[in-house]
Amino acid sequence: MLALVFILLVPAPLGAYAVYLRVQYAGEPSAEARTRNNDALWLGHAWVDGRKTEADVTALAEQLQGTGIRDLYVHAGPLEHDGTLPLASVSPKARWFTTAMRAAAPAVQGIHFDFEPVQSGSKGFLAVLDQTHELTTARGVPLSVAAAQIDPIFHVNVLPLLLTGEGKWWSHGYFAEVARRVEQIAVMSYDTAMPLQSLYGGYVAQQTQLALEATPASTDLLMGLPAYWESNPSHWGHAETVAAAVRGARLGLGASTRKNFGLALYIDFTATPENWAAYRDGWCVAP
């Protein structure tokens, strides 16, 4: 009987939530919801392991022209179990790339952490951010972090915890705790399992609103764009598109005048010309 009740009750709230997301995706984004030149791009490991050349750096700099991309998140890891990063063996061309890239297209220098998974409420992660922030502050560079999505429905994070032992979302409060400890936070607003573009776009709109509420005005906030294709239960490529994410973020941003807001493309080596066009046309080009 308990199982039957569960089966009967679960579809109702999920259906109501789907309707809510579809409503979130309705209407026209504000004309003011355009790039504030605080966007970013995640870059793969090829840029720091010797596979890229000066010509590639020049091509990347040219590709970034006319966009709002200011920051590049370069994959320089992985870290060792003790937290060290042996650049000489893991990313031997890291210094070459940062020097070449700053010469070709000046960008902000700093540290971007992408630790996965980080469970909501993790005190260890907050401690790492506190310790790192002391170092970055002393050197006058920003600390940036990739963040999990925010719990979209009250305590829904309990479900994946019960089923897999790992949560998918951060609580609103924990997201705020992380955001207060960094200069920039980028939400990984993809891999949502949404089956339709309208639902995915509505979900991004909701996540944008939640993140805006939780992020201090002094911290840069960016929403991730899925510039890659997968087709599986956690990421339906026909639904999770750059165009839907851009439109959803614009709807969530509304008429906000917040300047330190942006979008972040994930990731350079899978981004297609269509992905770039959706980002440029939807976010960078005024109507």
Image (tube, helix red, strand yellow):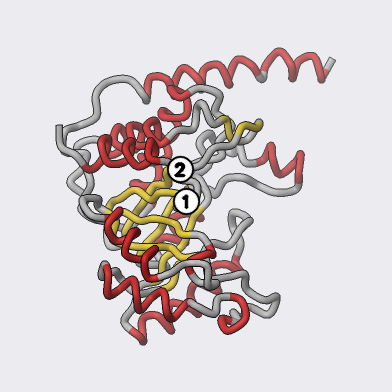
Nearest the viewer among 46 and 70 is 46
Disc 1 marks which amino acid?
A: Ile
Q: Residues within 10 Å of mark 1 (few under 14, many from 20)?
A: some
What residue appears at the point 24 percent right and 29 percent down from the top-left corner? 29
Nearest the viewer among 180 and 108 is 108
Residue 278, x across and y down, in percent: 33, 36
Q: How far apart are the alpha carbons under marks 1 and 2? A: 6 Å
Query: Which of the marked residues, 1 or 2, is nearer the chain's N terminus?
Result: 2
What residue appears at the point 37 percent right and 25 percent down from the top-left corner? 24
Quadrant where the N terminus is found in the figure:
top right
Disc 2 marks which amino acid?
A: Ala
Residue at the limit of the structure toward the right, as seen here: 1
Residue identified by numbered label 2: 227
Quadrant where the C terminus is found in the figure:
top left
Residue at the limit of the structure toward the bottom, as seen here: 138
Label disc, if present, on residue 80 of the rendered structure: none
Residue identified by numbered label 1: 267
Nearest the viewer among 92 and 132 is 92
In this picture, is 204 found above or below 142?
above
Residue 118, x across and y down, in percent: 61, 58
Instruction: Say left or right for 218 vs 203.
Output: left
- Label 1: element kind: loop
Instruction: Say left or right for 179 vs 16.
Output: left
Question: Residue 164, located in which quarter of the rendered image?
Answer: top right
In this picture, is 273 found above or below 186?
above
In this picture, is 50 found above or below 165?
below
Residue 97, x across and y down, in percent: 41, 74
- Label 2: element kind: loop
What residue appears at the point 46 percent right and 62 percent down from the top-left corner? 145
Determine whether label 1 and label 2 are within 8 Å by CB.
Answer: yes
In this picture, is 13 found above or below 252?
above
